[in-house]
Image (cartoon, rainbow, N blue to C red):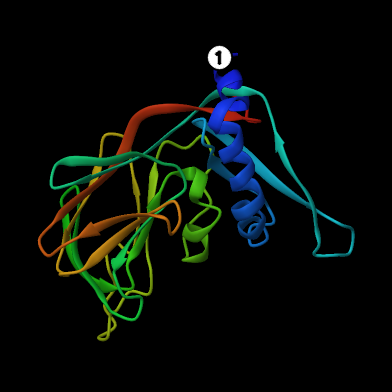
Amino acid sequence: QDIIDKYLSGPFNQKCVEFGVNQLRQMILEQREGRVQVCHAGLVEWVVPVFEPKSDRLEWVLFAGQCTPGPKLTQVTRNGEVVTARVLNDALYCHASPAATSRYILQLGDVNEQQKSSGFWIGPAAGSTAAQRSAGGRVLPLTSKQLQLVVREPYTPHGESYLLRHALIAPGQTLTVRSKMPDARIFLDGPDKVVEIGYGDVVGFSQAAQQLTVLGLSAR
């Protein structure tokens, strides 16, 4: 009840209304099946758009459900320091310019691989229905504890294939990335939260320890 009271009072209510009116309305049009997101009060919520019959006109947006323990998020570190432990949907690692090639070295377990691409998506199951899926990834059950890596437009001019073109990162594992770019970026859950990455910076992606509250999903 304390969480709900916090959600409905003070600046949280204003921020949530502003987010719903000014930002969510546009994003939800591209995700007609719905999306899972973190609200400003720290709750994970399931958001579903409802359209008028035989029309693309958005009639209303449903925020539904009962509070139950939810899945863990993605933690991101840069040179050993935690940047964030609250990535719900996905992180995009790429060159600062969308027209430039992303160059980096991936390491997962015993596999160490140098890649060129348009960058890669990584995130938990909550983000697997959006960007990860569009880039060729799988839709994971929301109860999955794995992170998913999906490389965007891998550059393999000689017909070779990357071992880490697509991978699932198990709990306890860390995907390590060493930048070979002087000016790279990590975009966290959209375009607004950005981390700057320089040449030689080492970034780690792993499961965060934090567990949030989910609305509308079974605890089983």
Q: Position of residue 40 (x, y in %)?
A: 51, 36
Q: Residue at x 54, y 32 (%)?
A: 11
- Dot 1 corresponds to which residue? 2
Residue 46 location, x and y as percent? 63, 39
Residue type, mark 1 in image: Asp
The C terminus: image quadrant: top right
Secondary structure at badge 1 equals helix
Residue 107: quadrant of the picture: bottom left
Q: Residue at x 69, y 56 (%)?
A: 32
- Please indicate whether residue 185 sits to the left or right of residue 144 in the image: left
Residue at the extreme top of the image, as rendered: 1
Q: Quadrant of residue 173?
A: top left
Asked if 99 appears above or below 177 in the picture, the reply is below
**Looking at this rendering, what residue extends furthest in the right direction?**
53
Q: Residue at x 25, y 86 (%)?
A: 158
Q: Is residue 28 left or right of residue 147?
A: right
Query: Horizontal and vertical percent for residue 151?
Result: 35, 65
Residue 118 versus residue 145: which sits nearer the camera?
Answer: 118
Reply above or below: 108 against 80. Answer: below
Task: Give the left or right position of residue 132, taking residue 118 as reference.
Answer: right
The answer to whether residue 5 is above or below residue 96 is: above
For the N terminus, the quadrant is top right
Please state which of residues 166 and 89 is positioned toward the viewer in this rendering.
89
Q: Residue at x 61, y 58 (%)?
A: 27
Reply above or below: 35 against 207. Answer: below
**Residue 195, visible in the rendered structure:** yes
